[in-house]
């Protein structure tokens, strides 16, 4: 199987490193020519819970240099999904599967619009990764990966992906209700990401302060109301207890949104709390806490270069 990972961010680099252990042909597609060249020359360095090693991987800046892929894994930030999939068109053939393991809600829809819904596989992963430098990644946490199609169908190709992932130690299963899984992950991100980005606290410390505990609870309650109205079946019974448990389990993590803010990068707020705000407006359900979180994060993004006068 020819597997092409689009975007060498933290998750893309981690997957490239782990999947390179398989007998499959693994490529990275990176639009950034300089970075592609650097990773081609230096290879990938992986450290952390799966051991330290350096490996070579094929990287291309132009999709035409790769040829048709059997599986494309989209690992870019959600706001780059449309550009990434348009750019990847030359490697997408009739039987190419496109897997998204990105954060938030909306990526499956964007990819489907460009490439056709029948090709798209959604997924969530609990692996934690931090990008140290281009091509260099720390594997920070291990967990299950779950994949599935919006229509619940399980084509042979999806079983092959599961087999390859499991062979290299990426514990993977298939679900017929990927929407429920994506929303279950969304609610965790709704509770943690924006609040850590605003307060600059790591995940665990959100539990230490009465104020952050209260805001987290309200944000999660609003999101759960939306999910309930949309008849989405979450994979846990008590969403608040689940989000609090994730804060404890990932206590020392700097959430992906806080990492973005610290590096003055655009965040995925529109695909996380922004989803709750838009759905709230559509369904007539008040979501004031998520609205404030979106406004605060957007203000932080817009004022990265503002400095206070002495
Ligand atoms: O986005 C993240 O950082 C992660 O999904 C999570 C679960 C909040 C842990 O840091």
Image: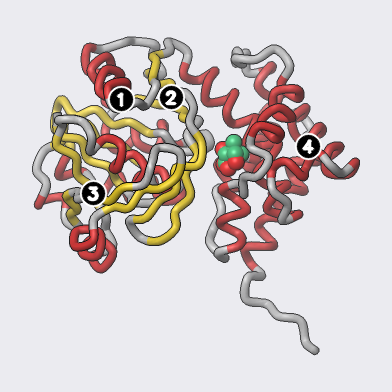
* C-alpha gap between disc 2 and disc 1: 9 Å
Q: Is residue 242 above or below residue 210?
A: above
From the viewer's side, name the closer residue of 228 and 216.
216
Q: Secondary structure at mark 1?
A: helix
Q: Earlier in the sequence, mark 4 or mark 2?
A: 2
Q: Nearer the viewer, mark 4 or mark 3?
A: 3
Q: Earlier in the sequence, mark 2 or mark 1?
A: 2
* C-alpha gap between disc 2 and disc 3: 23 Å
| Residue position for label 2 | 145
| Residue position for label 1 | 165
| Residue position for label 3 | 55
Mark 2 in CB contact with mark 1 (< 8 angstroms): yes
Q: Quadrant of residue 39?
A: bottom left
Name which residue lies at 84% across and 42% down: 208
Q: Position of residue 185 (x, y in %)?
A: 57, 28
Callout 2 crowding tier (Cα within 10 Å): few <14, some 14–19, many ≥20? some
* C-alpha gap between disc 4 and disc 2: 25 Å
Is residue 281 in sight in this rendering? Answer: no
Q: Earlier in the sequence, mark 4 or mark 3?
A: 3
Q: Is residue 87 above or below residue 102?
A: below
């Amino acid at each position: 199987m020819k597997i092409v990972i689009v975007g060498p961010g933290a998750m893309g680099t981690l997957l490239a490193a782990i999947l390179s252990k398989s007998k499959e042909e693994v490529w990275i597609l990176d639009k950034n020519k300089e970075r592609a060249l650097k990773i081609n020359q230096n290879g990938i360095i992986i450290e952390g819970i799966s051991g330290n090693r350096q490996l070579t991987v094929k990287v291309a800046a132009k999709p035409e240099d790769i040829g048709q892929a059997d599986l494309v894994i989209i690992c870019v930030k959600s706001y780059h999904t449309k550009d990434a999939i348009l750019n990847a068109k030359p490697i997408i053939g009739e039987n190419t599967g496109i897997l998204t393991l990105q954060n938030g809600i909306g990526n499956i829809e964007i990819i489907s619009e460009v490439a056709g819904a029948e090709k798209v596989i959604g997924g969530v992963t609990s692996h934690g990764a931090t990008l140290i430098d281009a091509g260099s990644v720390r594997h920070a946490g291990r967990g299950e990966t779950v994949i599935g199609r919006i229509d619940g169908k399980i084509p042979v190709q999806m079983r092959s992906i599961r087999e390859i992932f499991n062979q290299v130690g990426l514990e993977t299963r298939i679900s017929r209700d990927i929407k429920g899984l994506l929303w279950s992950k969304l609610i965790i991100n709704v509770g943690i990401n924006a609040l850590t980005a605003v307060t600059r606290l790591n995940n665990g410390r959100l539990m230490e302060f009465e104020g952050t505990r209260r805001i987290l609870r309200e944000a999660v309650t609003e999101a759960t109301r939306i999910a309930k109205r949309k008849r989405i079946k979450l994979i846990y019974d008590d969403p608040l207890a689940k989000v609090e448990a994730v804060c404890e389990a990932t206590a020392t993590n700097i959430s992906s949104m806080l990492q973005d803010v610290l590096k003055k990068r655009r965040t995925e707020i529109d695909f996380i709390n922004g989803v709750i705000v838009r759905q709230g407006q559509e369904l007539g359900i008040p979501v004031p806490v998520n609205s404030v979180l979106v406004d605060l994060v957007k203000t932080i993004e817009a004022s990265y270069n503002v400095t206070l006068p002495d």
